[in-house]
């Protein structure tokens, strides 16, 4: 049985090592390599792989964020790849999920692939394909353990200003900073979109583009354009681009809000 496989890791050296080891198994077909979680979401939806080797620590959208962006039906069999991370290792062991420590050992990878092959065979025999209950339990735990931000301290003219997230309409990426748009005010904070997204309440904010997060109750309407994308119009009049990567996510969020 051929396993259509995607390798997701932001380190080129790590991807090369995985590619070399995977090619020792003639029944593994590498259909894509991705250097970040956003590209991986696109690849999974376009290529529908059987297995994904998923790095946990990545910029913008990490391994856990990648899984939480996909719907349960879209998630393939997952083998996690991680440097030593006490929380990640505990979570994987508690839920009996496959993980590989960097640098990846060939024999350990072969055993993980063998187990993945068995799970893929089980999925192919089911209709619809079930999401591994151990993975579902992990995602549930990640959601339950989160403590979300309610305010962000911002330095301005030598002062420390507290910006309440209840006042923020949308957030934009700006190199190594993010810009908080709160009414007529703009506040720049040194942070990444991926890290900030993980700390925001998903019932209040949703990512609509790799460089944009919006407050859900500030959305007025979605307007399709001529290229298959949408423009998100906020109640304050701001017009923002919704990329295809995040379209299903925002549609699911808006359905929940109705």
Image: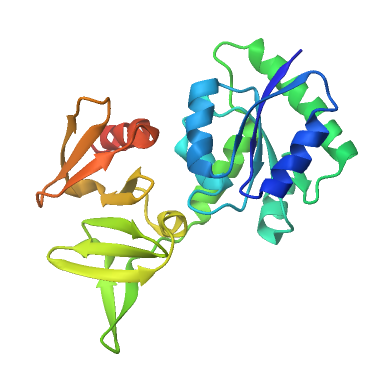
Provide residue 79's location: percent of width, then percent of height: 70, 37
Residue 39: percent from left, percent from top: 50, 38
Q: Name the residue at 80% across, 28% down.
A: 23
Q: Where is residue 155 shown, x and y percent of the image? A: 32, 81
Q: How is the image coloured?
A: rainbow
Q: Residue at x 54, y 45 (%)?
A: 36
* Name of the residue lying farthest toward the right: 107
Is residue 96 among the parts visible in the rendering?
A: no
At horizontal 85% and vertical 32% (from top left) the residue drawn is 110
The N terminus sits in image quarter: top right
Number of disc labels: 0
Residue 98 placement, left or right of 64:
right
- Residue at the far bottom in the pictured view: 158
Res. 3 visible in picture: yes
Q: Answer with left or right where residue 199 lies relative to residue 243.
A: right
Check the image and report above or below for 80 versus 157: above
Give the image quarter of residue 243.
top left
Residue 98, position as x, y percentages in the image: 74, 39
Using the rendered view, name the quadrant where residue 187 is placed.
bottom left
Front-lying residue, 98 or 6:
6
Q: Is residue 146 above or below residue 235?
A: below
User: Viewer-proximal residue, 211 or 254?
Assistant: 211
Q: Place residue 75 in its image quadrant.
A: top right
Check the picture and name the quadrant holding the C terminus: top left
Seen from the viewer's position, the closer of residues 169 and 122 is: 169
């Amino acid at each position: 049985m051929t396993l259509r496989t995607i390798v997701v890791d932001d380190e080129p050296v790590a991807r090369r090592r995985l590619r070399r080891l995977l090619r020792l198994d003639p029944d593994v077909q590498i259909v894509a390599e991705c250097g970040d979680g956003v590209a991986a979401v696109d690849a999974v939806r376009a290529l529908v792989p059987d297995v994904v080797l998923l790095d946990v620590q990545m910029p913008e959208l990490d391994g856990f964020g990648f899984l939480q962006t996909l719907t349960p039906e879209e998630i393939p069999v997952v083998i996690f790849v991680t440097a030593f991370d006490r929380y990640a290792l505990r979570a994987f062991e508690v839920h009996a999920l496959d993980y590989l420590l960097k640098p990846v050992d060939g024999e350990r990878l072969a055993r993980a692939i063998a187990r993945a092959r068995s799970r893929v065979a089980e999925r192919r025999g089911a209709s619809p394909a079930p999401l591994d209950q151990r993975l579902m339990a992990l995602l549930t735990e990640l959601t339950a353990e989160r403590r979300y931000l309610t305010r962000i301290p911002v330095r301005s003219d030598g002062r420390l200003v507290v910006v309440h997230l209840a006042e923020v309409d949308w957030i934009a990426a700006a190199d190594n900073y993010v810009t908080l748009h709160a009414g007529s005010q703009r506040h720049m904070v040194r942070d990444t979109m991926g890290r900030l997204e993980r700390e925001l309440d998903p019932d209040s904010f949703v990512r609509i583009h790799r460089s944009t997060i919006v407050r859900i109750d500030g959305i007025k309407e979605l307007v399709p354009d001529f290229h298959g994308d949408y423009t998100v119009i906020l109640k304050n009049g701001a017009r923002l681009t919704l990329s295809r990567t995040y379209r299903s996510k925002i549609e699911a969020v808006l359905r929940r809000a109705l």
